[in-house]
Image: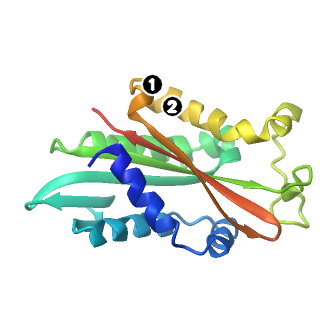
Amino acid sequence: MKVKELEEYIRSELMKVDGDELAFIQLTGKEERLIRDKTAYAMYRDGMVVKREHKYIDIVTFQDDNYSDLIEFSLFYTWDLLQEKMYMNKNGIFAKLTKDKTKLANFPIAVNKFMVLCILHPRRDKELELFEKENLFSYPQFFDKFLMNKYDEIPLIGFNRIKNDFYHNILDEAISHFKMEFGVYRATQLNMYFWIIPIIK
């Protein structure tokens, strides 16, 4: 499978989900399984042999009884990428991505291997009211004035941190990047950014 094919599987099935339902699910308790299960089902409907949670890998595909693709998903909010206690604690984003990348890189068979980063970026129209306690989330206290002014740039700022830590040896043109706009929950629009990254040992 090529990166663009995987992108199409993710897009095609998520576009069928009711946008407001997806916003409700993600903004009341982010849910990675919804995305990866929809992706796996799109592959299955396309005639592929697909297993979920095979050898601790989120999605594995087969061709002629041989491994074909290994795919790991990670889901987080944009501001978690910039908050040290979320990014660097022993069970945080850095630890999870390190584990997933190592698992894929060390898989003993040469097949296509992908990391799919799914980054949630909610938006309210009125001066970031999203973060007021009476609305939806507590305001991320570590944000400073610069980040508030650059709110729409935070997904790229966060991804660049990940790329510098994990994927600096992968050419930008090898990475698929796209954005999807979903529905609304409590006057909050949910946007999601995806980066699909091929893994090389």
Q: Position of residue 175 (x, y in %)?
A: 43, 36
Q: Amino acid at mark 1?
A: His
User: Crowding at label 2, few (<14), some or many (≥20) Cα neighbours within 10 Å?
Assistant: some
Q: Which residue is mark 2?
A: 163
**Residue drawn 84% across the image and 45% down it:** 141
Apparent side of residue 145 relative to residue 171 in the rendered image (left or right): right
**Quadrant of res 8:** bottom left
Residue located 26% across and 49% down the image: 1
Q: What SS does tag 1 mark?
A: loop
The image shows residue 58 at horizontal and vertical percentages of 35, 60
| Residue 147 as seen in the image, left or right of residue 39 | right
Residue 184, position as x, y percentages in the image = 74, 68
Q: Indicate whether 179 appears above or below 9.
A: above
Query: Who comes first in sequence, dot 1 or dot 2?
Result: 2
Q: Nearer the viewer, residue 175 or 98?
A: 175
In the picture shown, does residue 16 fall above or below 141?
A: below
Q: Tell me, yes or no, if residue 103 can be seen here.
A: no
* Residue depicted at 63% across the width and 36% down the height: 156
Q: Is residue 61 left or right of residue 125?
A: left
- Residue that lies at the very extreme toward the left in this rendered image: 64
Q: Mark 2: which secondary structure?
A: helix
How many marks overall?
A: 2
Q: Nearer the viewer, residue 176 or 27?
A: 176
Check contact, mark 1 vs mark 2: CB within 8 A.
Answer: yes
The label shown at residue 168 is 1
What's the residue at 52%, 66% (across, down)? Answer: 15
3D distance between C-alphas at marks 1 and 2: 6 Å
Give the camera-side residue of 151 and 96. Answer: 151
